[in-house]
Each structure stands twice: as C-alpha cells, then as structure tokens.
Image (spheres, rainbow, N blue to C red):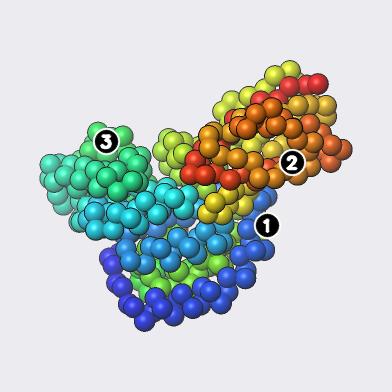
Amino acid sequence: MRRKLITTLVASALTAAGAIAGLAVTGTANAATCNGYVGLTFDDGPSGQTPALLNALKQNGLRATMFNEGQYAAQYPSNVAAQVNAGMWVGNHSYTHPHLTQQSQSQIDSEISRTQSAIANAGGGTPKLFRPPYGETNGTLQSVEAKYGLKEIIWDVDSQDWNNASVDAIVAANGRLTNGQIILMHDWPANTLAAIPRIAQTLANKNLCAGMISPSTGRAVAPDGNGNGGGGGSTTPPPSNGNCTATLSAGSSWSDRYNLNVAVSGSNNWTVTMTLPSPAKVLSTWNITASYPSSQVLTAKPNGSGNNWGVTIQHNGNWNWPTVSCSTA
C-alpha cells in the first residue's frame, strides 16, 4: 500500500473526474436522507495529489478520514491544513509506514509520536485515530496506541485501489458498505480520484452518508463537527424541554457550508432554539418560521409544513454543529 504516483494517470483521472462531476448534484441532494453512515478513509497522504482529491470530495458532498504518514505531513504541511479546511478528519498512519509488528516498543513509539507532532504542527490537530500500516497489529502496538489516546482503525472493505483496481471495482467496493462500516482507499491512485463522483452517487442511492469515525467505538457515525466522537446524528442526550425533542442529522456538505436536517418529535406545537458556534451563520432555512434573537441564535416555529425542517449553515471555519433545545408552546 505504498505510493505509486503516475503523472499521466493522475492527469487522465482529473479529466475523468471532471467529465462525470455532473453526477454530484443528484448524489448530494439524495444524501440528505441518511439511513446510515459509512467511513471513507484515504491512507498514505498527504501528497501532491491531495488538493485534487479534496476538490473531488468537496464537489461531491463527501467527507472522509485522511490517515496521514508523518513524513508526508512534514513534507506537505499546507495539504494537511487543506484537509482540515475541507472538512476532513485527520488520523495517524505512522511516520514511515513500516511493519510495526516487527519493531520494538521504542521504535513504535517513535513512529507514532513523531506523526502526532508532524500532523499537529501542520495544522491537522492531534489525531485520535490510528491506522496501522498494512493493517498489522499486536499487543505491543496497541499499548503504544493507548499511551497516545489513539483508537486503532482497520477496515471492513478493501477497495484494492493500491493493487491497481479499476474505477468500476473501486465504486463496487464502496457499494458493499453498510451502516457503520469503513472502507480502505488511498490518497494517490488515479482511479480512486476518478471514482469519487460515482462513489457519492452509489452511497446516495443507498441513503448512506459519509460520516466520521468515532474514537470511542471505531465505527462510522454521523459527524459531530469536531471529530471528538459520534452522537449518532443527534445530541447525546437530545436536549429537550417539556414534551418535545429536536434531533439533528447531516445533510449535504460543501467547502463553505453544510445542511442540517432537524426532526421534532413529541409535539406539533413547538419552539426550537438553535445556537450556532461563532462565527458560523445561518444562510437559509426551510419548512419553518424563523426569527433571530441574536446573530448566533435561530428560533424556529412550525409554519404548517410538518415537524421536519432544516438549515444551511456557513461554517466560516467552525465545523462544530449548533446546539438545539425544544420546548412546547
């Protein structure tokens, strides 16, 4: 699963991705209904191909976990920051991609600790997830992971993109994902880049959304905006007041904004207060009567369109989801 950069293939993949980018509109629109979440993961970055991969993911409303090697985080620090700015999550994939199960505890510690530092120094935050190279693990490795508070993440489906899998095969592998499962892909293969629009369409057709990987369970869950663990699409426990509950779930996502769906249960006569983290702003709403007591607070009331509504939020660099509370009128 090592880097095999082939310039001509990358160029052709960019052309192919652009040619089929029209699929993204349907895919991201359908993805607003999430019957489950899957974890898209990309190993071995960042690289010179990372910006093209991030653009393809953003254009198709997908978020993913990028398992970076420390040596490349140090070489391409701006691309680590770009991963975060694009709404991706960043994990640790060792510093030099060795067979860690053949190394001593001190060597393993060096591989992991240097990568934690390289990613943090590049603006990627402190990773909470670790992908062992080649999926190889043992008790010594797991003890070092625990020292750094890392959750070990393997995969449920191997796309085989590292083994020259075709675009069709990569898309088909993503089509085998079910709720909570994780797929292995890589930052560098040209066919992976070309497959992104069709991956988005395939997931949308199954009402699956690209989620984050919970550092608690190691499974794919609804994004919580900050990578600190999954609320499964709702706050935990759902804030409530009286006899109603407001539950959030992810909708479509773009580089500068994202949609949230809100479902109210327990009452048909409700008021939901949504408080946004600064400097995020509400751009638009649907199926509610909205008012704004302050720049960071939205008050929503029914407008006759039922108990399911939504908002488009301009994140302005803060991907944390708003908090919601519900009261009966």
In this picture, residue 226 sits left or right of residue 94: right
Q: Earlier in the sequence, mark 2 or mark 1?
A: 1
Label 3, secondary structure: give it.
loop
Q: Residue beneath label 3, please?
A: 148
Label 1 to label 3: alpha-carbon separation: 39 Å
Above or below, 159 against 164 in this view is: above
Q: 159 and 111: which one is in front? A: 111
Q: Earlier in the sequence, mark 1 or mark 3?
A: 1
Label 2 to label 3: alpha-carbon separation: 41 Å
Residue visible at 70% across and 31% down in the picture: 292
Q: 137 and 34: which one is in front? A: 34
- Residue 284 is situated, as x and y percent measured from the top left of the image, at 70, 45
Q: Amino acid at mark 2?
A: Trp
- Residue 170 is situated, as x and y percent measured from the top left of the image, at 48, 68
In this picture, residue 275 sits left or right of residue 74: right
Label 2 to label 1: alpha-carbon separation: 16 Å
Q: Amino acid at mark 1?
A: Asn
Image quarter where the C terminus lies is top right
What is the crowding at mark 2: few (fewer than 14 residues within 10 Å), some, or many (at least 20)? some
Above or below, 182 against 293 in this view is: below
Q: Residue beneath label 2, please?
A: 309
Residue visible at 74% across and 41% down in the picture: 309
Q: Residue beneath label 1, please?
A: 30
Q: Earlier in the sequence, mark 2 or mark 3?
A: 3
Label 1, secondary structure: give it.
helix
Q: 62 and 111: which one is in front? A: 62
Residue visible at 70% across and 19% down in the picture: 241
* Quadrant of res 69: bottom left
Asked if one can make out residue 237 in the rendered structure from this viewpoint, the answer is yes
Q: Amino acid at mark 3?
A: Tyr
